[in-house]
Image (spheres, rainbow, N blue to C red):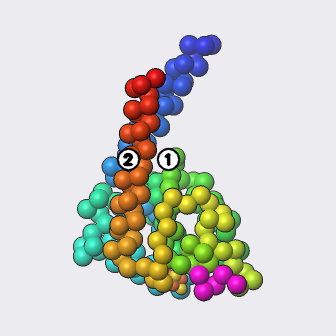
Amino acid sequence: MAEAKTKEGFLTRFLKKVGVNCAVRSPWIIHMNAGGCNGCDIEIVDALTPRHDLEQYGILLRGTPRQAEVLVITGPITLQVAERVKRIYEQMPAPKFVVAVGNCATTGGVFQEAPFVLGGIDKLLPVDAWVYGCPPRPETIVAAIANLLGKIKEDILSVEKKEVKE
Ligand code: SF4
C-alpha cells in the first residue's frame, strides 16, 4: 500500500513537472471576452499578427479550454457570463494561469458601477498577470505574457533547487 502511494506520488509529480514545462516552453492560450466593448480583443488579435508576433514565444491561440494553459480575459465580468467563465477555467488542465487584459478585466473599468457587473476577473478567479490600459497596446500584452512565462520558469527553478537540497 505504502509502495503504491509512493509510485502514485512520483507519477503525479512527474506529470505535473511535464505539464509545467510544456506550459512554459509553449503555452497555449484561450481568449474570452466577458462583456467588454471589443477594443481589447482587437489589440489581442494585433498581438498575434506577424507585426508583434506573440507566436515567436511559442504562444498559440486555441479554440478549446481543454488544450489551453493560459486564459486571457477581456472586459468586465458581467453576472450573465460569470458562471461560464468559471466553467471554462475549470475545464483547463493544470497548471493554468489567468491574464487580465484591459482596465475592464482588471477592475471593471468604465462599467464597474453598473448593477450587472461583478467587477474585475479577480472577483472570480486567481489572476497571474495584469495588463492595464483602455485598451492596452499590443506590445504591453506581449510583454505581460512573456513576463509571466519568465516568472513561472523562475518558480520552477527555485522549486527544483529546493528539491535538490532536500
Ligand atoms: S478596457 Fe476599454 S477597450 Fe478594453 S473592453 Fe474595457 S472599455 Fe473596451
Please tell me which of labels 2 and 1 falls first in the chain.
1
Name the front one of labels 2 and 1.
Answer: 2
Q: Relative to the observer, which residue lies in front, 15 or 141? A: 141
Secondary element at image label 1: loop
Question: Which residue appears at 66% of the width and 63% of the height?
Answer: 124
| Percent x, y of residue 118 | 70, 74
**Callout 2: 10 Å neighbours few (<14), some, many (20+)?**
some
Q: Quadrant of residue 113 in the image? A: bottom right
Principal SS element in the magenta part? helix
- The type of residue carrying mark 2 is Lys
Q: Which residue is mark 1?
A: 95
Amino acid tagged 1: Pro
Q: Locate residue 48, reporting x and y percent.
A: 33, 71
Residue 47 in percent (x, y) is at: 34, 73
Quadrant showing the N terminus: top right
With respect to residue 26, does 11 lie above or below? above
Q: Are marks 2 and 1 in contact (CB under 8 Å)?
A: no
Q: Which residues are magenta?
A: 109-113
Residue 64 in sight in this render: no
Q: Quadrant of residue 8?
A: top right
Q: CA distance from mark 2 to mark 1?
A: 13 Å
Tag 2 residue: 153
> Residue at image x 27%, y 69%?
53
